[in-house]
Image: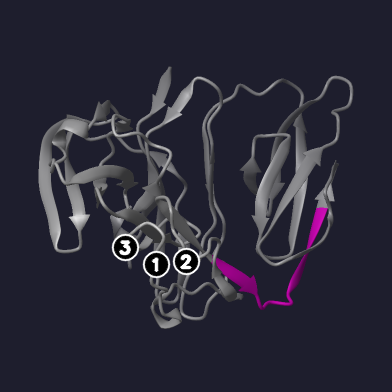
Amino acid sequence: MKKIKKYLLLLTIVFLGSIIIPPKLIDAETNVNVSVTSYFDENNTVVSTVANQVYGSKVSFASSLSSDSGYTFVFWIYNGVLRVDLPLSHQFIITSSTTLIGVFRPNDKLAAVFIDTNGKVLDIQYVTSGESALDLEVGTLPTKPGYVVAATKWDHSLTNITANTVFTLQYSSVSSVNYTLAVTDGSGDGTYSNNSYVTVTADAPASGKYFDHWDIGGRVASLDSTYTFTLLENTTITAVYGDSARIDHPMVGVSSALSLRSGYHTYLGHFELPPGYELIEHGLLVSSTADLV
C-alpha cells in the first residue's frame, strides 16, 4: 500500500487579496511527540507525552492513559474531534500534531458530550442515570454563516438520560440564497440552495475517448466521473475527456477565495485518493506573506 505522507495545501493569504500556491508533496517528519490526556473531569486531567513516534505509523495508546478504579473509559477525542466509533485499543495513525484525549466517566455516572456538527467538543458533563443534562447557552455556541441555532438545539432530549449520550448541535438555515449549477457534458445541473451537496455525473465518453477530469474555472476539480461537492457559488463545471486512459494518482485541490463571511477568507479544500493509497494527514499552510512558500 502506498502512503501519502503529507499533503499540505500551500495557501497564502495577504491583506489586500489572496495568492493560491499549487499543492506540493512535503517530506514527512521522522519522529514526532504525541500528547495523550486522560480526562476524568474538568478538574481532574492527566497529561502525558509519548515521545519519538514514527510519522505515519499506527500505534495504540491505551497503555498511555492513566487509570482509576472509580472511572470507566467511554470515548476518544482525536485532534479535537469526538470519535465514538473508536475502541480503547484503536491504533491511531501518527501525524505531525497528534493530540489524543481519553474521556472517562465516574462508574456511578453517565457521560453527556455536546458537539458541533463537525465533531468538535463543546462540553462534557456527567449525569446520574435518569436525570437531565444541563443545556448550553446560545451565546457560548458556534456560529455559521447563513444559519442560526435551531429552536430544538440538540438531536436528543436532555432529560431522562439512561446511557452515555452524544448531543449534536442543530442549525436552521436563514439564507434564501440559491445558486445555479451548469454542467457541460454531464448531468446534475439545476438551481440549489446555498451549501447544498450536489452530484454531477459525466456523460459516457465517445468512441475512442476516456473521461479525464472535471474542470471548474480552469482548475481540475475532481478525477471521479461522478463527483459530489458543496455548492457555495454559481458554478459551471465541465467534463473533460482524453484520447487515452488516465493513470490514477492522488489529487489535492482548493477553491478560489469564497466571500461567505465579512472579514474572512474562506476556501473549500478537496482531495481524492485512488485505491492502494492511504491518507496520513492533510491541512493548510497559511501566511500573511508569500515568503513562506
In the rendered image, the vertical position of residue 154 relative to residue 38, given as above or below: below
Is residue 123 visible in the rendered image? The answer is yes
Between residue 108 and residue 186, name the one nearer to us.
Answer: 108
Residue 178 quadrant: bottom right
Question: In the image, which residues are magenta?
Answer: 170-182
Q: Could you tell me which secondary element the residue under label 2 belongs to?
A: loop
Q: Check the picture and name the quadrant holding the N terminus.
A: top left
Give the residue type that dot 1 points to: Ala
Percent of width and height locating residue 192: 78, 63
Percent of width and height locating residue 159: 47, 66
Q: Which residue is mark 1?
A: 133
- Badge 2 or badge 1: first in the primary sequence: 1
Residue that lies at the very extreme toward the top in this rendered image: 1
- Badge 3 or badge 1: first in the primary sequence: 3
- Distance from disc 2 to disc 3, alpha carbons, whole Å, reads 11 Å
> Which residue is found at the position 33% from the left and 38% from the top?
26
Q: Which residue is mark 2?
A: 158
**Label 2 with label 1: CB-CB less than 8 Å:** yes
Between residue 127 and residue 94, name the one nearer to us.
Answer: 127
Q: Which residue is mark 3?
A: 125
> Which residue is found at the position 16% from the left and 31% from the top?
63
Give the residue type that dot 3 points to: Gln
Is residue 98 visible in the rendered image? The answer is no
